[in-house]
Amino acid sequence: MFAKEKIDQILDSYKDFKIATICSHSALQIFNGAKQYGVKTIGICTEKSRELYESFPYAKPDEFIMVDDYSKIPADELVEKEAILIPHGSLVEYTGDGIEDLAIPIFGNRSSLIYEKNRDKMFEWMEKSGLKTPRILKPDEIDGPAIVKFPGAKGGKGYMVVNNPEEYYSKVKEGAKTMIQEFIVGVRAYMHYFHSFDGEAGYKTSYGRVEMMGIDRRMESNADEIARQLSVGANIPISFTVMGNQSLVLRESLLPQYMEMARGVCNSSQNLFGGMHGPFCVETIVTDDLEIYSFEISARIVAGTNILETPYSLYTHGKDYTTGMRIAEELKEAFNKKKLKEIIY
Amino acid sequence: MFAKEKIDQILDSYKDFKIATICSHSALQIFNGAKQYGVKTIGICTEKSRELYESFPYAKPDEFIMVDDYSKIPADELVEKEAILIPHGSLVEYTGDGIEDLAIPIFGNRSSLIYEKNRDKMFEWMEKSGLKTPRILKPDEIDGPAIVKFPGAKGGKGYMVVNNPEEYYSKVKEGAKTMIQEFIVGVRAYMHYFHSFDGEAGYKTSYGRVEMMGIDRRMESNADEIARQLSVGANIPISFTVMGNQSLVLRESLLPQYMEMARGVCNSSQNLFGGMHGPFCVETIVTDDLEIYSFEISARIVAGTNILETPYSLYTHGKDYTTGMRIAEELKEAFNKKKLKEIIY
Amino acid sequence: MFAKEKIDQILDSYKDFKIATICSHSALQIFNGAKQYGVKTIGICTEKSRELYESFPYAKPDEFIMVDDYSKIPADELVEKEAILIPHGSLVEYTGDGIEDLAIPIFGNRSSLIYEKNRDKMFEWMEKSGLKTPRILKPDEIDGPAIVKFPGAKGGKGYMVVNNPEEYYSKVKEGAKTMIQEFIVGVRAYMHYFHSFDGEAGYKTSYGRVEMMGIDRRMESNADEIARQLSVGANIPISFTVMGNQSLVLRESLLPQYMEMARGVCNSSQNLFGGMHGPFCVETIVTDDLEIYSFEISARIVAGTNILETPYSLYTHGKDYTTGMRIAEELKEAFNKKKLKEIIY
């Protein structure tokens, strides 16, 4: 892991700062948000994607750094340009374990990404946060529908559902590293939050405040249209590749519980790895008893925030307000108050 | 039922007014709307929920009245503070029949809530409004999929589907009070309206005008993800607990019919119980022949309005515009024109 | 086909212009957009629909031309009023082949509508555009779930799914004109675009630029709630009548491909029939391998744009921005630059 002291030294050298990210996932939103707060932006981009990012005048980065491959983050060049890197799902996926060693300031806490990538650590974190989670099963414990997950955050691709140990053994290659979760019956809701080092709104945590930003539901191919196949008797296995997101709102009476959950996640993260900063998401399922099960925490901006419209951020900020805007505002405030080191690693 | 004359006396004593409601359901939206029109707000709140309502600067009530339990509305204190109570689904549920006797001005007509809570009266109202409704069946008349509803507006929890009389008798406890409705095959759309005593826009009714505000579809756990269970052969019964809402728009060619329906509901309500005022909703299903079946009227703001974004209110008001804003604007106008008594009981 | 030279003569005679369309489909959005750019509007309307279009102050046409029947477009009167007709799905459906002979300027290229209405031409167009399409099958080639479409754009009504030749022959009347498409397993996403003769944003095409406007998913009755029927063992055939639309966002990494697709569609349309102008839509399905299949192009505004809210138009125009606004802005700019003839036929 690249040393925190060295990141602090880099930050000490910054006279100003720019927002940089990989041109994918939620980059349009991040660039658009930065523009609204007058923060300059850098798009780390492949030739294939450049034209897209040039085609939106209000979401186009101020400059591009072209790369062949998103696994190679040009850290030196970014530091020279006084960049702060915004991590998102594609960045986490492309850089893999390499993200820990990146010699560039990353918004948030890179230690959190280790928890995001490791399923055992994830469940430890969720438990210490007081979240209700699906049971994790050994193959022989499968006693009903269970979801089998393979390592890596590849947008849900390759997830499988099995109903009993026999089905597991017949479908999963021997020796494969899998996590088996009880299939919780209910409806999914992915709650987006933002932790601020000194936000005026939100729930107080042990090291700042947490705000509710919005809610989405991931759209998964083919799971979200499987009913059409079923209805015609087609025998097609279900799959869970995330292809997009839709907005929803939740029963207002559930919100206090979601806020408590977020506070739990923030406070436990301080104990476990020094705290989280900026956007995060808790992926949940609401059962018909209105129990909230959590099955994942994303310790950075999620693509679901791309839906933009949400009552919750409006109620906090008094205007249409995105997670991209929130990131830029937070960094600007921290920069002005000389607090960047508290929220960057 | 608390006498209308006494409510009018209370209103006569008001030098100004505040908007009050229970901190649940659509309270954030109601408070946010009031703030935009400079109307002061009171949140009737339990300890458990207070922090949530304090955490949104633009949706936080100006003051709280703390209660142990939402079934106890502190009427005297509210009247002293010159409050007008905004009824929503949670208020109706928590106060039960007690709402009829509340010694406090309620926006709209408390008589309408009697129709909302009583299924026989509801069907009488829908028929007199000219709405097409699903057939109501006796147990022995069940000749295909039918939905069995139990008394109380508990967010759809405990609804059941049966296919024939035998299934009904085997699943429903003897003596249980149920309503059995034909299961209409189609897609649900819940249309939000607002009746104004002198709105300039909308369809003319016998005592004002009705506007189209927006449309949602309730998200029900586990019904809205039942396909995932079905696809893996899991034998899980369907349930209909409302856990949230999603926005949609309807074919524009259906809108004239929806407007006629709303006018029918308003006009018949005047004959039946002296008229409705403010927000209401007609819950419908659109079949593949584009027939519109109605299965419920909600005679007050519905939680589906929490989605906020809608083209229909934009086309009426020329800006982003919520039902919460509409309530505040209506009350302010009625107050200024000394017409509060016409729209409050 | 009414001659292009005659349309140009009509345009030469215009001192100013108004936007006209049939009061259905997306007319509220079109009128609302025009109002925002100060363009006068004409609603071609039946008695039945007039009250609806009068009830929205910000989407009401400036004047009405009343008709008995939408198949009769009063061309002379419209030309006299210096109208430009905006084609939408209902206009295409109601006028049928007659649209080719309408003696009135139509925004876009009326030749494109011939391609939209003819399935063979449609598939030729999609192939020449480089789109991946579902296989088109002869009845005897049906080797899995296949969708059977009947002629006419009647909102999906009457589409059928069959699994093998036997099922096809037993369900389809002998001699019926059908198109049989492989049933692609995935999730639908309908991408809205706008081609501009000289837009500053978007992807360059051979004769202008193409912008991404937004995405919807059509809601089909009963297909979008078929799971509820299935779960209770009800034996109800699936149907695909479009009754509304819902908003979604796509994985950002798919957007470059969608932009390439749009450019392909525009460029091939120039070769095939002289180019497309204004709004259009490519209807797609995203598989669990993130392959994008296209199954239709709509060469004019689609009703899915009625959802209004979209990040993509915000990123292009820097504010809430609808396809209705885009149409008015484009026509105004073309009028001022004396380029109307390039984008009207």
Image: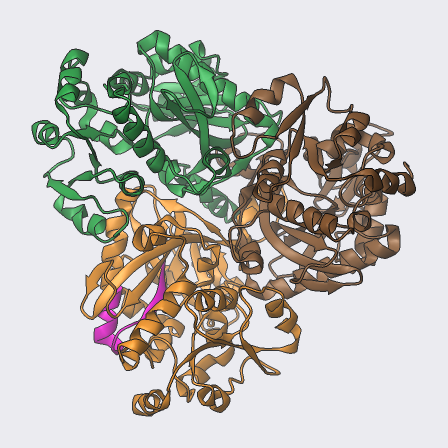
Chain colours: A green, B brown, C orange
Looking at the image, residue C249 sits to the left or right of residue C272; the answer is right
Q: Is residue C250 above or below residue C19?
A: above
Q: Is residue C133 above or below residue B240?
A: below
Which residue, as the protein is rendered here, is positioned at the far front?
B15
Residue B222 lies, in percent from the top left, at 58, 33
Residue B150 lies, in percent from the top left, at 77, 34
Residue A260 lies, in percent from the top left, at 51, 18
Q: Residue at x 47, y 41 (%)?
A: A247
In the image, is residue A281 part of the stretch drawn in magenta?
no
Frontmost residue, B245 versus B293? B245
The residue range painted magenta reads C265-282
Looking at the image, residue B73 sits to the left or right of residue C261; the answer is right
Looking at the image, residue B215 sits to the left or right of residue A246; the answer is right
Q: Do we see residue C174 in this rendering?
A: yes
Q: Is residue B258 above or below residue B86?
A: below
Q: Is residue B107 above or below residue A95?
A: below
Q: Residue at x 17, y 48 (%)?
A: A50
